[in-house]
Amino acid sequence: MERNRWYKDMVFYQIWPRSFKDGNGDGMGDLWGVLEKLDYIQSLGCDGIWFSPIYPSPGADCGYDIADYMDIAPEFGGMEAFGQVLEGCHRRGMKLLMDLVVNHTSDEHEWFQKSRRRIEPYTDYYIWRPARPDGKLPNNWDSNFEGKAWTYDEVRGEYYLHLFAVKQPDLNMDNPLVREEVKKILRFWLDMGVDGFREDVITYISKKEGLPNDHLFPIYKGMPHYNHGPHIHEYLAEFKRDVFDHYDCFTLAEAPLVWPKQALKYIDETQGQIDMMIQFQSQCADCLFTDYLPMPFSLRRMKHAFSQWQYKLAGRAWNMLYLENHDHPRIISRYGSERYWKESGKTLAVSYLFQQGTPFLYQGQEIGMLNWQPENAEMYEDVQTRYNYAHSNLKKTEKVRLRKMWRSSRDSARTPVQWDDSANAGFTTGTPWFYVNENYREINVAAQESDPDSILHFYRKAIALRKTLKSVRYGTYRDHFPLHSKLYVYSRETEGEHLLVVCSFADKPVKMKIPRSFDLASAELLLGNYENNSSILRPYECRVYRVQQ
């Protein structure tokens, strides 16, 4: 069927379920809590929800190790609660996306348990290899989470490949039976009424034939042999042809280490296999490849990433816009300023909400939640954080090593949402499954609902405004001063309407700089985070102007 690209006019809200809202008092966020907060999500101006995994899972990677793809975990409320949330979304005119995680499963999945015992037809559902003749691992690849990418299985007597945690064995997508299983999963949820999928590390599903050693990549050794592998476009085209083309649905691919030119092979609207792509470049303005290799924040790097995707996708594909998700620390703590918490939170919102694309908000972003700073490493839950801490520079003091985790850990953004200043931040009436950030008495939804100058109300205004401006949907984009180290000034222009966005990322006053083609004397200030505007921008000041043409 002809694809209806309804996602272009939407704003999505990402829910990491176990930390969103507990609806039954057991300490774990669940779908009953989501049902309770649907009106709140809609009040932000969000038209859709993306759920991180809510399937049955042992929890080795907080739900990204799936044991059953066609059920909802009982701790989240099971299928009954899911049905009510789905109906509640659709009744409000909202869409619902599931997380499709098919590069790997849990090692407790029925498929893996049968594969390790060589029970047909599951024998080759995973990637198994014997040890090399010299007794070494099948190749030199690293996992993304826990050391080497191979673990020996005593039952099968062979090694299995896992690009992530030890308990996340990789599926063998070269096996056509595995691809048919994926199609069954897709149809199951689409037939139920789900509106689409965010596809977890989907560019990893095709590995190079022979699984050769990697002698080039310094970190994540092996990645050139499995990221954008030899059959990736063939397999994605198969899923599109056999499933997605028969539904009015939306697909969003997560793609580590991808650049716009390469992305177009996936998301070009005339010949691509998926609709939009989550890129990591905009998350690397303060690190090298990964959050665990931190560098000082560079506004120039951030602007370059944003602008390259805006320029190169224009007229050919659609951008996915985001600042935060479950895989990265909180953005104010990274790109903004905790000292100028409110001001930088608003400026960060403006920096991305008026670009061309579909924005995503991550739970708590709309109230400016900050990084969590635990007292010791044992308090972390995340498998990646635990491994990185244990293998960080042991010559450094514990305080220094822990500070790096504060800056880098995914758990920094996985603490419970701060709803009010009551016990446990209003997240649960029970004992929370995870630690609540101690700043919840100052930073919470209830306090910001009653403050008209809050970050929360600013997000509502910004989202409502972007939906009224045709230049945001259709206009051209231009970064006017790409080498400026303090200001991000971009325009969106379409016939009859020119938009100018000015964002200061300085903690001191900066002289405003605007392109010569814009005359602010005839401009209308649509949005800003300070009163009494002048030619001097105050710390982390942002402004959005409209110039009628």
Image (spheres, rainbow, N blue to C red):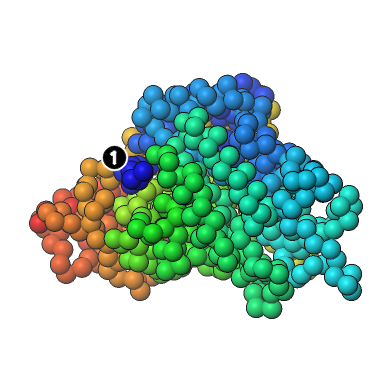
Using the image as rendered, state which of residue 303 and residue 344 is in the foreground.
Answer: 303
Q: Residue at x 24, y 53 (%)?
A: 474
Q: Can residue 338 be seen?
A: no
Q: Residue at x 58, y 66 (%)?
A: 230
Image side of residue 212 versus residue 303, left or right = right
Across and down, in percent, residue 98 comes to: 52, 39
Across and down, in percent, residue 404 comes to: 65, 60
Q: Residue at x 58, y 39 (%)?
A: 185
Q: Secondary structure at mark 1?
A: helix
Image side of residue 392 versus residue 44, left or right = right
Image side of residue 141 versus residue 447, left or right = right
Question: Which residue is disc 1 drawn over?
Answer: 464
Q: Determine the residue located farthest toward the bottom in the rendered image.
A: 215
Q: Which amino acid type is shown beneath numbered disc 1?
A: Ala
Across and down, in percent, residue 544 comes to: 25, 52
Across and down, in percent, residue 430 comes to: 66, 24
Using the image as rendered, state which of residue 138 and residue 146 is in the foreground.
Answer: 138
